[in-house]
Image (tube, rainbow, N blue to C red):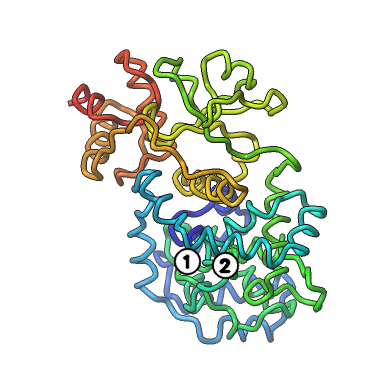
């Protein structure tokens, strides 16, 4: 239960912010929950959903303040990559993942033929999201979605999810009673948003309905269908661990910058075992999740898909790394030993950058996209290695 529970995927956030339904006109600041709920029911009827499905979905929902509290208290991705991946890519997940790949070999082979996504990639998501379907959550999904849609933080996004949940009931995939999951409203073994359930869910076992809670084949095929939609490229790599020289144009180490592998080779980037990066690889970015002295990877266009599944860099890097482990690669190297700032120190860096006029987003101790961009800009300004990762040297300079 990782993806939405801790950070919304960028594609969903974008969808919510551009919703044209007019739903932003109604949230808790605009009236009572009961009146708001009547408005949702009217919208569902206007969208052609049956009264039976609407009544079943919304007849017993309530506003739950504890859901809002949980939504405000997210922070697991403040952990550094080695800490987070060390915890999440545990030996039991590696063993269970390998066992599942073997056990369901025929299903994975069929999915790869149909969608181009290999078994290790799907298995890693399956393991991280729900421990291979063992922990899909048991909270009241409809109450969660109604609460988050009524809350004024992201009403458009979650109203879309609530309406999609009603659609799931209306088309007969699940009953209202079966809609159970984590507090943020995701569903099933790969933790789909209801909107994605409706759009990308596949009846892969042929029983006439999409069941992402109990059907393994439906869940894995739906994940592959979604990844293909996001741009997954058949037969291409997603992540390769590399080692980097002590000197390199560090400002080029950015997931937004891609170079041919010949350029990375010319700059001294080698595979983890010292071999050359395959010349036939597509252009890649140099990903340094903990800066120039930590682990290093070449990330490819397929890795960009991970960042849409979940826009947290530490989660996406962990999921992609997990998939490489399941594909036979060794445990990640710690590099030369990166400095790891405490949560308080990262927050201080963010505050100092914000004081200089940089947009770091929320002061939360998470080294996210905007914080990394601000760090890189200041590193360039100060003549420090511009690896986009805050160090104690940078903190001292900012102070």
Q: Please name the residue that numbered disc 1 is placed on.
A: 184
- First in residue order: circle 1 vs circle 2: 2
Rendering coords of residue 289 (x, y %): 43, 36
> Closer to the camera, 156 or 214?
214
User: Secondary structure beneath disc 1?
Assistant: loop
**Is 312 positioned to the left or the right of 111 in the image?**
left
Q: How many marks?
A: 2
Find residue 237 and report its horizontal and vertical position in percent: 66, 38
Reply above or below: 368 against 373: below
Task: Write the residue at 36% across / 16% down.
Answer: 380
In this rendering, the answer to whether 252 lies above or below 134 is above
Q: Secondary structure at mark 2?
A: loop
User: Counting other residues with Cα less than 10 Å from the Cα at mark 2, is it few (<14), some (14-19), or many (20 or more)?
Assistant: many
Q: Which residue is mark 2?
A: 132
In percent of width and height, residue 11 lies at 59, 49
Q: Quadrant of residue 175?
A: bottom right
Q: Nearer the viewer, mark 1 or mark 2?
A: 2
**Crowdedness near tag 1: few (<14), some (14–19) or many (≥20) residues, C-alpha within 10 Å:** many
Q: Residue at x 36, y 48 (%)?
A: 83
């Amino acid at each position: 239960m990782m993806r939405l529970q801790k950070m919304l995927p960028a594609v969903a956030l974008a969808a919510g912010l551009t919703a044209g339904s007019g739903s932003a006109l109604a949230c808790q600041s605009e009236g009572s929950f009961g009146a708001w709920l009547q408005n949702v029911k009217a919208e569902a009827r206007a969208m052609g959903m049956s009264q039976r499905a609407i009544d079943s979905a919304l007849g017993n929902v309530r506003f739950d303040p504890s859901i809002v509290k949980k939504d405000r208290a997210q922070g697991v991705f403040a952990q550094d990559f080695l800490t987070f991946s060390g915890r999440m890519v545990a030996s039991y997940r590696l063993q269970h993942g390998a066992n599942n790949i073997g056990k369901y070999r025929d299903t994975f082979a069929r999915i790869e033929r149909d969608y181009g996504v290999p078994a290790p990639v799907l298995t890693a998501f399956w393991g991280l999201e729900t421990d291979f379907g063992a922990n899909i959550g048991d909270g009241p999904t409809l109450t969660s979605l109604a609460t988050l849609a009524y809350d004024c933080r992201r009403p458009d996004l979650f109203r879309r999810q609530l309406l999609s949940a009603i659609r799931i009931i209306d088309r007969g995939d699940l009953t209202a009673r079966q809609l159970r999951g984590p507090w943020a409203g995701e569903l099933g073994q790969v933790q789909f948003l209801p909107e994605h359930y409706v759009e990308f869910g596949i009846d892969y076992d042929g029983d006439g309905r999409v069941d992402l809670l109990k059907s393994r084949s439906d869940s894995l095929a739906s994940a592959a269908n979604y990844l293909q939609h996001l741009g997954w490229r058949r037969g291409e790599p997603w992540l390769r661990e590399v080692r980097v020289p002590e000197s390199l144009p560090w400002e080029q180490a950015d997931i937004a910058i891609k170079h041919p592998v010949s350029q990375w080779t010319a700059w001294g980037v080698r595979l983890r075992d010292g071999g050359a990066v395959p010349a036939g690889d597509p252009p890649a970015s140099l990903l340094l999740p903990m800066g120039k002295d930590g682990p290093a990877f070449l990330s490819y266009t397929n890795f960009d898909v991970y960042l849409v599944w979940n826009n947290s860099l530490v989660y996406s890097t962990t999921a992609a790394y997990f998939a490489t482990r399941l594909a036979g690669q060794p445990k990640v190297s710690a590099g030369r030993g990166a400095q790891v700032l405490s949560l308080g120190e990262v927050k201080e860096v963010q505050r100092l950058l914000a004081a200089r006029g940089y947009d770091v987003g929320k002061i939360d101790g998470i080294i996210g996209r905007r914080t990394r961009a601000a760090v890189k800009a200041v590193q360039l300004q100060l003549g420090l290695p511009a690896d986009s990762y805050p160090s104690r040297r940078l903190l001292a300079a900012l102070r």
